[in-house]
Amino acid sequence: MRKFDVPDQYKSNRIAQLKELRKQQDPRKKDFSPSRLDFGPLQVLIPRHFGFCYGVENAIEIAYKTLDKHPNESIYFLSEMIHNPVVNDDLKKRGIQFLQNTKGEELIPIDGLSKDSIVLIPAFGTSLEMKARLKGMGIALEEYDTTCPFVVKVWNKAEKISKDGFSVIVHGKPEHEETRATFSHSANASPTLVLRNMEEAEALAAFMKGELAEETFYQTFDGQMSKGFRLKKDLIKFGVVNQTTMLASETQGIALYLRSVLVDIYGEENIKQHFADTRDTLCYATNDNQSANIRMLEEEADLAIIVGGYNSSNTSHLLELAEEKLPSYFVSGAECIRADRSIQHFDLANKRERTTADFMQKSSPLKVMLTSGASCPDTVVEEVLMKLLSFFPAAEDYDTVVQSYKSSLL
Ligand code: SF4
């Protein structure tokens, strides 16, 4: 896979050393067991895959190169480049301005830009309407488009099945930039509907089977359908694509469930005419990170720490996986772990930060799972690890522990 030019400030020698070790031991990425670092009073489990993905590194490379190339010009990002505060804050400090917030509301009037304005498109991509608007103003986008190729792959898949006459169901968060972009591309080619989760898929099935009245269908999925979408006409044949950072198992579950609904209505022998095979739209990074975390969660530990931006979709799914098994804390950085042994963390269900006192239980050794999302720099993970270690003065030093872990792999 291509190597990107990522600024040193996001690289961690310690984490890179560990990742390299695993890569040498398992070049074909078959072993998803976590790395186990035994510091004595503290044991840390780190998943086989975590951190910056292809799309994030690609976006970072383009953004920083653009800054270097145009030091005296105004540079805009259509919205947050990725969902990580460390990276976004640094870009802002260097003068990049965000035109919209994550909901697509304008922070800076887009109509006030000129044809010479430099506008970067984030890794999530953007809608066809926004691209047309910017191009209509004479703004050149090609050089500054950081849309991840794995997102484009989803758009291409939606377009392909549209050409074969299938409608498109998008499994995603309707308000997320990537889902809005995918919806726009798909709706341009075919009737499209967004489903947030299995609950909505079940409601959709009830409408398809006539168990719920058609009138309430349009109310239930208001704002999640393409213009003119009709229950009776547009759900006869469809395929399911996803926002690339959703839980892979949930997308697969929704696709299989809706396929079974179509089988009930039209019969297994006719399913190919009613359900398009779209299995290959899952992103490799989401897959690998989720698989590695699921594998790590088979181990025993006292708690899990998940590092990343609170609005990061892929990171929040890692939290959801961990929360099912053990006390889990979603933190944005090392500063969330305080000297009084409390932790400030994001409560996903209530969408607010809260503090948990004395979060490090008294187990000896304390076993911690540590992971991060695809938009979180490794430096932040290292800082969290070092912060944890600072509470254990008797702990072995990092290099010694990694060397002994290396020996255990041989
Ligand atoms: S998570 Fe996947 S689709 Fe999203 S930016 Fe990373 S590589 Fe691209």
Image (cartoon, rainbow, N blue to C red):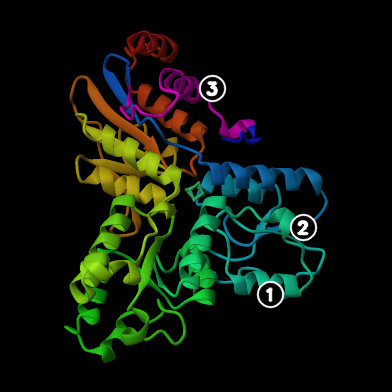
Under mark 3, the amino acid is Asn
Q: CA distance from mark 1 to mark 2?
A: 19 Å
Under mark 1, the amino acid is Arg
Q: Which mark is residue 133?
A: 1
Asked whether 33 falls inside the magenta stretch, the response is yes
Q: Which mark is residue 13?
A: 3
Query: x%, y% of residue 346?
Result: 35, 50
Give the left or right position of residue 290, taking residue 77 as reference.
left
| Residue 290 seen | yes
Q: Quick one: 146 or 399, which is closer to the camera?
A: 146
Above or below, 116 against 401 in this view is below
Numbered-mark total: 3
Asked whether 356 falls inside the magenta stretch, the response is no
Q: Are marks 3 and 2 in contact (CB under 8 Å)?
A: no
Q: CA distance from mark 3 to mark 2?
A: 33 Å
Residue 168 figure quarter: bottom left
Under mark 2, the amino acid is Ser
Q: CA distance from mark 3 to mark 1?
A: 43 Å
Q: Are marks 3 and 1 in contact (CB under 8 Å)?
A: no
According to the image, label 2 marks what residue? 74
